[in-house]
Image (cartoon, rainbow, N blue to C red):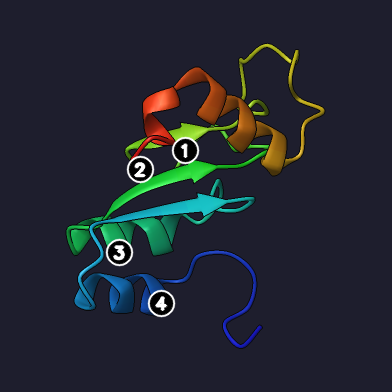
Amino acid sequence: MLEGYGPNAPALLRLREEGAGLVICVDCGTTAHDALAAAKGAGLDLIVIDHHVAEPLLPSAVAVVNPNRLRRSQRAGHLAAVGVAFLLAVAEPRAVDR
């Protein structure tokens, strides 16, 4: 509530300083280019799980999982981010076993 919606550079950099190595952004991040670039520059790995319509240029991240990326099938474009996250967990069961 205090930092606004979506990833922001100060918060991501603070997470890195506190020892985080990976941040998973859910329901945001597809258009947060500056914040994610700053975090990546600090050595933080990022995964974006989102459903918002993407721009042609994707943010710098390990992965951008978004059915509403340009030039993608619209079969799952109706899903909210929670549905995208669920399908990712189903597709990669090792991710939930850790």
Side of 97 relative to 56 (left or right): left
Q: CA distance from mark 4 to mark 2?
A: 16 Å
| Image quadrant in which you'd find residue 63 | top left
Name the residue located 38 percent from the left edge and 57 percent from the top edge: 36
Task: Say which mark, if any, is on residue 38.
Answer: 3
Q: Nearer the viewer, mark 1 or mark 2?
A: 2
Residue 42 vs residue 30: left or right?
A: left
Does dot 4 land on a helix, a strand or a loop?
helix
Amino acid marked by disc 1: Leu
Q: Earlier in the sequence, mark 3 or mark 1?
A: 3
Nearest to the observer: residue 60 or residue 66: 66
How far apart are labels 3 and 1 at the CA level? Answer: 15 Å
Q: Amino acid at mark 4?
A: Ala
Which quarter of the rendering shows the N terminus?
A: bottom right
As displayed, is residue 92 above or below residue 20? above
| Residue 42 image offset from top left, x and y in percent | 19, 64
| Residue that carries the numbered disc 2 in the rendered image | 61
Q: From what the image shows, is residue 15 above or below residue 75? A: below
The three-letter code of the residue at mark 3 reads: Ala
Instruction: Give the crowd class for mark 4: few <14, some 14-19, many >=20 residues within 10 Å.
Output: few
Q: Are marks 3 and 4 in contact (CB under 8 Å)?
A: no
The answer, for residue 83, to whether it is visible in the render is yes
- Quadrant of the image containing the C terminus: top left
* Tag nearer the camera, 3 or 4: 4
Gap in Å between the C-alphas at discs 4 and 1?
20 Å
Contact between marks 2 and 3 (CB within 8 A): the answer is no
Location of residue 54 in the rendering, given as x and y in whole percent from the top left corner: 62, 37
Say if mark 1 contacts mark 2, CB within 8 Å: yes
Q: Which mark is residue 58?
A: 1
- Name of the residue lying farthest toward the right: 78
Residue linked to disc 4: 11
Q: Residue furthest front?
A: 97
